[in-house]
Image: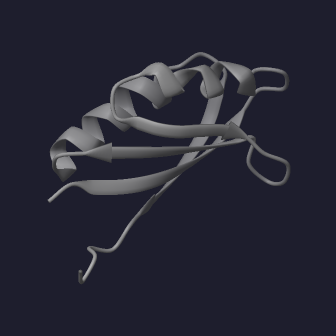
Amino acid sequence: MSVRAFVLVETKPGTSEEIVRARRVRGVKLANSVFGRFDAVVVIEAKNYEELKRNIYEMLERMPGVTHTETLLCLPSTE
C-alpha cells in the first residue's frame, strides 16, 4: 500500500516556480503554484512513510527559496 501526502510550501517571493518544476522528481505526482497563505502545493506518493519522509526532506526542504512546509498525510483508504 502506498502513502500520499499534500505538502503546502511557503517560498521566498518569486521562487515558487522552482517548486512546480519538482514535479519531474520521482514520487511527485502533482505540483502547482497557488494563491493564498502558501505559494505551492505538492502531492507526493511513496511506498512507505520512511520513503515519503526522505522525499519531502531531500526534495523540498533543501530547495533554495523554501521557507516553510506543512505536510498533510492522507488517511489510508478503506477500499
Give x and y (percent) for residue 62. Answer: 46, 21
Q: Residue at x 23, y 80 (%)?
A: 79
Looking at the rendered structure, the number of numbered marks drawn on it comes to 0
Q: Residue at x 37, y 32 (%)?
A: 57
Q: Is residue 61 left or right of residue 66?
A: left
Residue 32 vs residue 36, the one in the foreground = 32
Q: Is residue 9 above or below residue 77?
A: above
Outermost residue on the bottom side: it is 78
Q: Is residue 78 above or below residue 33?
A: below
Q: Is residue 16 left or right of residue 59?
A: right
Q: Residue at x 40, y 44 (%)?
A: 44
Q: Is residue 17 left or right of residue 67?
A: right
Q: Residue at x 43, y 35 (%)?
A: 28
In the picture, residue 15 is in which quadrant? top right
Q: Is residue 51 above or below residue 60?
A: below
Q: Is residue 66 above or below residue 64?
A: below
Give x and y (percent) for residue 75. Answer: 33, 74
Give x and y (percent) for residue 2. Answer: 21, 54
Q: How is the image coloured?
A: one colour
Residue 65 vs residue 42, the one in the foreground = 42
Residue 63 vs residue 44, the one in the foreground = 44
Residue 77 vs residue 57, the one in the foreground = 77
Give x and y (percent) for residue 1. Answer: 14, 59
Outermost residue on the front side: it is 79
